[in-house]
C-alpha cells in the first residue's frame, strides 16, 4: 500500500517508517511512503504557504493555490483512485472499522494542516473524506497521519509476526483485548491466572473471551451498546454464548448490568 502525505514537516512523518512494525513493513515493500512539502510548490522567494484569513482573526491559513498544486502532483504519482483524506478536528472520529476499510485500498493521500487549518476551497475541490483522532487539538495533522499509517500498516498481510495478531487486537470485534501475562509466574504476590498455565486451549480461549467482554463492559460500555443496537454494520451482535460469558464475569466480580433499557433485551 502506498501513502502520500502532504506536509510541511516531512522529516516528522517519515520517522514513522524508521523503526518498529511500520519500519519493517517498509523495508519488506509492504508499504511505501512519499511526503510532499507544499513549500516546494510555492512560487515566491520566501516559499510562502500561508496567509491571513479573510474576515480577520488570529493565526494564518494554508493557501489554496499552493496546496492544490501539491495535492494534484501527488495524485499523479499515487495509485489511480487513491482517496484524499484531510486530518481535521472537523472530521469524523477514526475507529478500527474505518482503518479496516482503508487497509484494503491501494493508496491514500493524507493532508496535514498547520496553523489555523487549510483554505476551505481545497476541501471542496480535492478532499474525499475528513477524519479526526479525537476531540482535542494538535499542532498539525502529522501525528494523525502517522497514527493512520501505523494502524493501517498493521492490517497489511504479513506485516505482523503472526497473522492472527491483528485479529486479536482491541476493537477488532468492537471489544477490548483481554489482559496478558508473561514470566515470572508470580510478581509481588500477584500470580498468573491458573487457567493460562493449564495447557487447555479451549478453556484458555473461553477465559480470554470472558475477560474481553468484561473489560469492555467496565471500561467501554458504549462499544457493547453499539454492538447490541447493530449500529456498526460490520460488527456481529453478541452471541448467546457471549452473553453467558458476560453474565459469568459480572457475577464473579459482583457487578450488575447498567445498560440503557432499550439495549438490555439485546445484551
Image (cartoon, grey):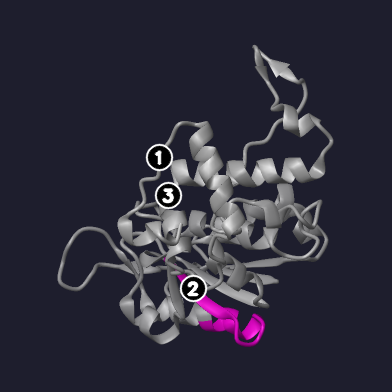
Disc 1: which residue? 256
> How far apart in space, not on screen, are marks 2 and 1 (Cα)?
42 Å
Is residue 83 part of the magenta span, yes or no? yes
178, 89: nearer the viewer: 178
Q: Are marks 2 and 1 in contact (CB under 8 Å)?
A: no
Q: Estimate the x, y position of residue 185 in percent, counting from the top left.
A: 75, 20
> Which quarter of the picture shows residue 116?
bottom left
Give the label, 2 or 1, closer to the camera: 1
* Stretch of the chain drawn in magenta: 72-87
Disc 2: which residue? 85
Disc 3: which residue? 221
Is residue 115 part of the magenta span, yes or no? no
Give the label, 3 or 1, closer to the camera: 1
Q: Is residue 69 left or right of residue 204?
A: left
Q: Secondary structure at mark 2?
A: strand
245, 148: nearer the viewer: 245
What number is the disc on residue 108? Answer: none
Q: Secondary structure at mark 3?
A: helix
Q: Residues within 10 Å of mark 3 (few under 14, many from 20)?
A: some
Q: Residues within 10 Å of mark 2 (few under 14, many from 20)?
A: many
> How far apart in space, not on screen, are marks 2 and 3 (Cα)?
30 Å
Q: Are marks 3 and 1 in contact (CB under 8 Å)?
A: no
Amino acid at each position: 500500500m502506498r501513502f502520500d502525505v502532504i506536509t510541511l514537516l516531512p522529516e516528522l512523518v517519515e520517522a514513522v517508517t524508521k523503526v518498529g512494525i511500520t519500519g519493517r513493513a517498509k523495508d519488506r515493500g509492504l508499504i511505501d511512503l512519499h511526503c510532499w512539502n507544499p513549500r516546494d510548490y510555492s512560487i515566491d522567494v520566501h516559499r510562502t504557504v500561508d496567509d491571513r484569513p479573510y474576515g480577520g482573526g488570529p493565526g494564518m491559513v494554508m493557501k489554496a493555490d499552493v496546496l492544490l498544486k501539491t495535492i494534484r502532483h501527488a495524485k499523479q504519482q499515487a495509485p489511480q483512485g487513491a482517496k484524499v483524506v484531510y486530518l481535521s478536528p472537523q472530521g469524523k472520529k477514526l475507529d478500527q472499522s474505518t482503518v479496516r476499510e482503508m487497509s484494503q485500498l491501494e493508496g491514500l493521500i493524507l493532508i496535514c494542516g498547520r496553523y489555523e487549518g487549510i483554505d476551505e476551497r481545497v476541501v471542496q475541490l480535492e478532499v474525499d473524506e475528513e477524519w479526526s483522532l479525537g476531540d482535542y487539538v494538535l499542532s498539525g495533522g502529522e501525528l494523525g497521519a502517522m497514527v493512520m499509517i501505523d494502524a493501517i500498516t498493521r492490517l497489511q498481510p504479513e506485516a505482523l509476526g503472526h497473522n492472527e495478531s491483528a485479529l486479536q487486537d482491541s476493537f477488532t470485534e468492537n471489544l477490548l483485548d483481554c489482559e496478558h501475562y508473561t514470566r515470572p509466574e508470580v510478581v509481588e504476590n500477584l500470580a498468573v491466572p491458573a487457567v493460562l498455565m493449564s495447557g487447555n486451549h479451549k478453556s484458555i480461549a473461553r477465559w480470554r473471551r470472558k475477560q474481553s467482554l468484561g473489560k469492555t463492559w467496565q471500561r467501554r460500555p458504549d462499544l457493547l451498546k453499539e454492538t447490541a443496537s447493530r449500529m456498526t454494520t460490520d460488527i456481529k451482535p453478541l452471541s448467546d454464548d457471549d452473553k453467558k460469558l458476560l453474565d459469568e464475569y459480572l457475577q464473579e466480580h459482583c457487578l450488575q448490568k447498567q445498560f440503557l433499557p432499550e439495549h438490555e433485551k439485546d445484551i
